Amino acid sequence: MQFHLREMSLEELWNLHEKTAGELTRRMTFAKAKLDERLRKLSSQSHSERRPYPKVLAKYRNPRNPNETWAGRGKQPRWLVAQLRSGKELDQFLIRRSS
């Protein structure tokens, strides 16, 4: 469909604008509904299939505050970073387990 916009009257241009805006709204609503349905399917699958992670025992303990421990996973806690920067070794904070 080809339009000669320069030759159209103001009323014809306004009608074309309204038709175009209506069609865009309809198509965007349809596309959003499809995306929402896909998102709903994805979110329902991901929540039901997540495996439980086992508790991990602490490997390191803060000597200044024995309640602060770290399992050795993830980001190092602030107390450990400060101790390592002061020159101490990671092995100095190991929790000794009796066998």
Image (cartoon, helix red, strand yellow):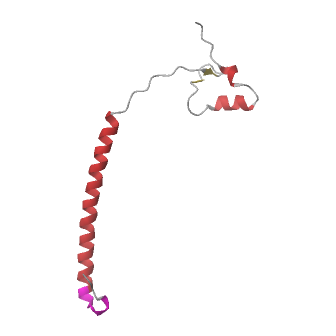
Count of numbered circles in the view: 0
Residue extending furthest toward the top: 99
Magenta stretch encompasses residue 11: yes
User: Residue at the location (58% across, 34% down)?
Assistant: 75
Say if 40 sits above or below 94 in the image: below
Left or right: 41 with respect to 63? left
Which residue is at 28% across, 60% downward?
Answer: 31
Q: Nearer the viewer, residue 62 or 71?
A: 71
* Residue at image location 26% in from the left, 50% down from the top: 37
Image quadrant in which the C terminus is located: top right
| Quadrant showing the N terminus | bottom left
Q: Is residue 7 above or below residue 62?
A: below
Res 79 quadrant in image = top right
What's drawn in magenta, residue-wise? 5-12
Position above or below: 39 against 22: above
Q: In this view, does 62 lie to the left or right of 48?
A: right
Magenta-colored segment: predominant secondary structure? helix
